[in-house]
Image: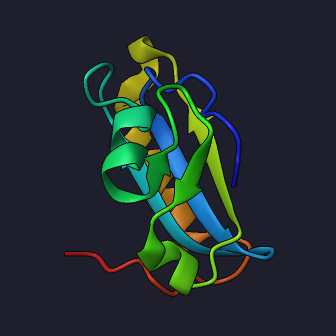
Amino acid sequence: MQTAIPQPQLPGVYAMARDETVVYIGKGEREIPAGLGIRLAAHVIRAVRRGGPYTLREKWQAAGVTGVYTLAIASERQYLIPALESYLIGHPPGRPEMNQRR
């Protein structure tokens, strides 16, 4: 994957897919310093340089992830993020195989 994350400073949800099947759904709930960009950088991607492009961490490459999709949410609506994440986990286009509720 060689692209930048759109609106990395905003909170929101993200999905990782293997081909067209969602295998993981997560969230980045706060603005800087913990928006989508920071969350993805901490757990999903490695930036080649600040602002992109990026590559997947080895764990996700080994799992066959082929795409990362983000949905940024306006800061004043970030209270919706946990509900959106929960909904997407329950209604993905395919079962998320790797999501584990802790």
- Farthest-out residue, left: 102
Q: Quadrant for the N terminus, please.
A: bottom right
Residue 86, picture quadrant: bottom left
Q: Check the image and name the residue furthest to the front.
A: 48
How does the figure colour the protein chain or chains?
A: rainbow
Residue at 28% across, 30% down:
34
Tally of numbered tags? 0
- The x, y position of residue 70, in whole percent, is 61, 43
Asked if one can make out residue 43 in the rendered structure from this viewpoint, the answer is yes
In the rendered image, the vertical position of residue 77 relative to residue 86, given as above or below: above
Q: Residue sitting at 30 percent across and 49 percent down? A: 42
Please identify the residue farthest to the top as the structure is shown: 76
Residue 82 visible, this orientation: no
Residue at 80% over, 74% down: 20
Against 35, residue 60 (above or below) is: below
Which image quadrant for residue 31? top left
Q: Residue at x 58, y 58 (%)?
A: 15
Quadrant location of residue 102? bottom left
Relative to the observer, which residue lies in front, 62 or 16? Answer: 62
Residue 85 in the image: state x and y as whole percent: 46, 53
- In this picture, is 67 found above or below 90? above
Q: Where residue 21 sits: x, y (%)?
A: 73, 78
Q: Nearer the viewer, residue 85 or 60?
A: 60
Q: Nearer the viewer, residue 19 or 45?
A: 45
In the shown orientation, is residue 86 left or right of residue 4? left
Closest to the observer: 27 or 58?
Answer: 58
Image spot of residue 52 (x, y percent): 58, 33
The answer to whether residue 46 is above or below residue 7 is below
